[in-house]
Image (cartoon, coloured by chain):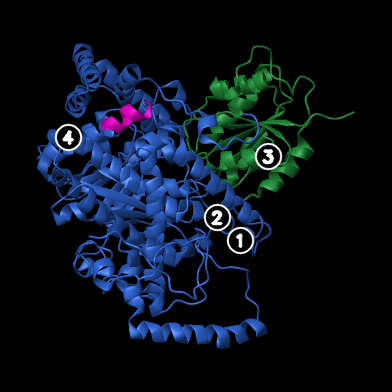
């Protein structure tokens, strides 16, 4: 039986608009055969989670360079839990001091990829740590594409 | 002035180039014929022998931006580069060698360290530290809420207040930020774009309040919205009204703030987002042309505003390419200002630039290596002839700089200025065959890219169509592939790696800053006159709707203590909120 491809959302959360890394990760994950949904810029945690659940993703990769990670990333984790989807894996990349990585893990962020991480390491990690969710893989009925919401 | 063609001498390895007519006159010159003959002999003899003994380390050598580098550069390589028409003299058209005749012999570049974090008090303290340690100009970094038009108490400001720059929501914050700084003596650059008109209004209001005449104020406002849509992506309203307000600032300053640079037309962000040096030149200069054209279209005399336009370049790691880039930029701009816009004053032709060493080149791994990178990049900017320079701190892949890190970054500039000898001669690499050849190459390629932008209808049309965004994303993707294929080596990252590395000290911004800013806002809202604020906001809205210059009513409004968020909301109401369409700005791969 064929397992469906993993579906990942790459999201820019908060006010930070630096999207070079996020866009490169989108292409790298697609090149590796994953299905990728990109959130677009300047999304609040609520918007990211709503779009992610609508799109039926198995994991969310959050890109953030603004220093707001200790507030916004745990919020995404908490919102997923509140919406009954705690199995959606949350990982992150961007500008994060090393000391904050442990705090983010405690808050439920599964991994933080610092600058210089090769994209194939992210792909390997995703394949090892993200499962195809039973309720994932297909957009929820009457969902708008994540990019346009 | 004739259109320029730059001949590359035969014998230089070809690329996909090159329909340019060989400059027959030049090749008639006997000395170049002799050099060419020598080069051919060298190629057949010493080069061939060397290659047989020892193959090259890579199949081809290119600059960081992909320009193939010939086996050797010599006098014949620059046969088409005229020493007077193209190279010339510093301070003289076309300014290839620098905007000023004496360059750093007359005055060193401004050492202008970008700074800002936490509360206005925190940043004011950092400014005083920097001034005490020798910066010669100030540069303000604002937090994301201020850049995006939100007050500290807005829901979207949660977690962001003071984290990536200084938090400002009102005139009171600006008063604290600029406390104790002599505004008629120190120049202040403000890196702010979508809310630049509001920031300038607050700055002017502070000066008015202190009795500093507006014509004594010196500084720069970044205010380049075209590059936001192309690269940095900090915006509020859509491109056309944002572009219009950038031009409002230029017009206002031309009349009211004669010592102020109302715009810093930026390549930094475009390059950092992934563009090549050629794209950085082309997209930035295209933006410059768009601003000039728009200001001319609204009735300004080009010679009235062009002398105060300024530019902002990235400085990446390919030393010679960056030096050449600075030189090519000045030459292209001078010719455009003279030939296309008919500017008559030399001051209108010259491109003055600030530069910043490349943030994207810094590594999280072995961060102390970043000191070396920054030093080399800074040296390139100086040899390129920059007027103003910011050097990055070693810790910026983790956080905003600590005091120690930013002091070392400043010392880097001071060592270059006082110990390296680069301050003693203008354009020291002028006449270098490699640098003159590369200057001409970059110019040729940038002009071709510029032509494509103009064919689309100029930079505003181009950003609305997503053109530079797609080009930049393509370059970024190619760069990453080359990095991961090992074609580009980054020390500490994919070469000479360490195992575990101990964390370095980093700056932390306390959440208390946000609470204090919110409290300050509450106090301001309680103390101000609601009627006056409403009237002031209405005046801004009227000007916005009528297509009038928004600066005068903005100054009145900030004095009435209208907040940055409230004023941004006026623009949201009038012009709408911009959302980037990812389908427009990505090459179509997969379903988004």
Q: What span is colored magenta in the figure?
A: B237-245
Chain assigned blue: B
Write down the quadrant of residue B5 in the picture. Answer: bottom left
The reply to whether label 4 and label 1 mark residues of one chain is: yes
Nearer-the-camera pick, B357 or B295: B295
Judging from the image, what secondary structure is the residue with disc 4 in?
A: helix
Q: What is the chain letter for disc 3?
A: A
x 86%, y 30%: residue = A2
Disc 4 from disc 3: Cα separation: 48 Å
Q: Is residue B65 above or below residue B477?
A: below
User: Which residue is label 4 attached to?
Assistant: B252
User: Which residue is label 1 attached to?
Assistant: B492
Query: Is disc 1 in contact with disc 2, using a CB cutoff of under 8 Å?
Result: yes
* Crowding at mark 2 (Cα within 10 Å: few <14, some 14-19, many 20+): many
Q: Is residue B465 above or below residue B433?
A: above
Q: Would residue B314 be seen by someone viewing this image from the given angle?
A: no
Q: Is residue B307 left or right of residue B363?
A: left
Disc 3 from disc 2: Cα separation: 23 Å
Query: Is disc 4 in contact with disc 2, using a CB cutoff of under 8 Å?
Result: no
Tell me which label, 4 or 1, sits earlier in the chain. 4
* Crowding at mark 3 (Cα within 10 Å: few <14, some 14-19, many 20+): many
Q: What is the chain letter for disc 2?
A: B
Return the mark for residue B481: none
User: Which residue is label 2 attached to?
Assistant: B363
Chain assigned green: A
Look at the image and say whether residue B238 sits in the magenta stretch.
yes
User: Which residue is label 3 attached to?
Assistant: A29
Judging from the image, what secondary structure is the residue with disc 2 in?
A: loop
* Crowding at mark 4 (Cα within 10 Å: few <14, some 14-19, many 20+): some
SS majority, magenta: helix
């Amino acid at each position: 039986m064929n397992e469906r491809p993993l579906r990942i959302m790459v999201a820019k959360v908060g006010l930070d608009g630096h999207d070079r890394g996020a866009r490169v990760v989108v292409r790298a994950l697609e090149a590796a055969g994953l299905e990728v949904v990109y959130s677009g810029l300047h999304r609040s945690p609520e918007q990211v989670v709503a779009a992610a659940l609508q799109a039926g993703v198995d994991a969310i990769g959050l890109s953030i360079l603004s220093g707001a990670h200790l507030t916004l990333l745990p919020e995404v984790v908490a919102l997923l839990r509140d919406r009954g989807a705690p199995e959606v894996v949350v990982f992150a990349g961007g500008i994060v001091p090393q000391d904050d990585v442990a705090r983010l893990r405690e808050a439920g962020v599964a991994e933080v990829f610092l600058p210089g991480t090769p994209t194939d390491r992210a792909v390997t990690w995703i394949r090892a740590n993200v499962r195809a969710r039973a309720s994932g893989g297909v957009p929820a009925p009457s969902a708008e594409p994540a990019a346009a919401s | 002035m004739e259109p320029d063609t730059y001949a590359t001498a035969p014998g230089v390895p070809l690329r996909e180039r090159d329909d340019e007519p060989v400059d027959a006159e030049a090749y008639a010159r006997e000395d170049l014929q002799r050099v060419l003959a020598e080069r051919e002999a060298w190629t057949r003899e010493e080069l061939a022998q060397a290659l047989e003994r020892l193959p090259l380390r890579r199949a081809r050598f290119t600059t960081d931006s992909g320009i193939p580098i010939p086996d050797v550069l010599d006098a014949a390589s620059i046969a088409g580069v005229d020493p007077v028409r193209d190279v010339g003299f510093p301070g003289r058209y076309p300014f290839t060698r620098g905007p000023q005749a004496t360059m750093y012999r007359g005055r060193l570049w401004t050492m202008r360290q970008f700074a800002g974090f936490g509360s206005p008090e925190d940043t004011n303290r950092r400014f005083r530290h920097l001034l005490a340690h020798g910066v010669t100009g100030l540069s303000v970094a604002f937090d994301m809420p201020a850049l995006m038009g939100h007050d500290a108490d807005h829901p979207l400001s949660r977690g962001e207040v003071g984290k990536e720059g200084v938090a400002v929501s009102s005139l009171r914050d600006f008063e604290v930020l600029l406390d104790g700084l002599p505004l008629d003596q120190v120049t202040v650059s403000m890196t702010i774009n979508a809310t630049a008109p509001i920031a300038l209004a607050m700055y002017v209001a502070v000066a008015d309040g202190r009795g500093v005449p507006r014509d004594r104020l010196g500084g720069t406002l970044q205010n380049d919205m075209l590059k936001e849509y192309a690269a940095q992506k900090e915006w509020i309203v859509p491109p056309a009204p944002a572009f219009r307000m950038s031009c409002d600032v230029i017009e206002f300053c031309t009349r009211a703030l004669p010592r102020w640079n109302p715009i810093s037309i930026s390549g930094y962000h475009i390059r950092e987002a992934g563009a090549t040096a050629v794209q950085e030149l082309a997209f930035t200069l295209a933006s410059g042309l768009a601003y000039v054209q728009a200001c001319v279209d609204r009735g300004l005399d080009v010679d009235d505003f062009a002398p105060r336009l300024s530019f902002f370049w990235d400085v990446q790691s390919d030393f010679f390419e960056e030096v050449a880039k600075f030189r090519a930029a000045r030459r292209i701009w001078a010719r455009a200002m003279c030939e296309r816009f008919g500017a008559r004053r030399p001051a209108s032709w010259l491109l003055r630039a600030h530069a910043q060493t490349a943030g994207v080149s810094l590594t999280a791994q072995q961060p102390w290596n970043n000191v070396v990178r920054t030093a080399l990049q800074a040296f390139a900017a100086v040899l390129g002839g920059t007027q103003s320079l910011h050097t990055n701190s070693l810790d910026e892949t983790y956080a905003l700089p600590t005091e120690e890190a930013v002091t070392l970054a400043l010392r880097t500039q001071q060592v270059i200025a006082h110990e390296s000898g680069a301050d003693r001669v203008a354009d020291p690499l002028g006449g270098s065959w490699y640098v003159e050849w590369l200057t001409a190459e970059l110019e040729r390629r940038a002009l071709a890219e510029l032509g494509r932008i103009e064919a689309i209808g100029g930079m505003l049309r181009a950003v609305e169509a997503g053109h530079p965004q797609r080009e930049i994303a393509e370059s970024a993707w190619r760069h990453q592939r080359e990095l991961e294929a090992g074609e580009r080596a980054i020390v500490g990252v994919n070469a000479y790696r360490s195992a575990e590395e101990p964390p370095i000290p980093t700056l932390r911004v306390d959440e208390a800053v946000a609470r204090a800013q919110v409290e300050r806002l509450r106090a301001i809202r309680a103390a101000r006159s609601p009627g006056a604020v409403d009237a002031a906001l209405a005046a801004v809205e009227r000007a916005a709707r009528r297509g009038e210059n928004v600066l005068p009513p903005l100054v009145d409004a900030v004095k009435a203590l209208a907040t940055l968020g409230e004023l941004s909301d006026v623009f949201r109401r009038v012009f709408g909120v911009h959302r980037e369409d990812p389908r427009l700005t990505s090459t179509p791969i997969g379903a988004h």
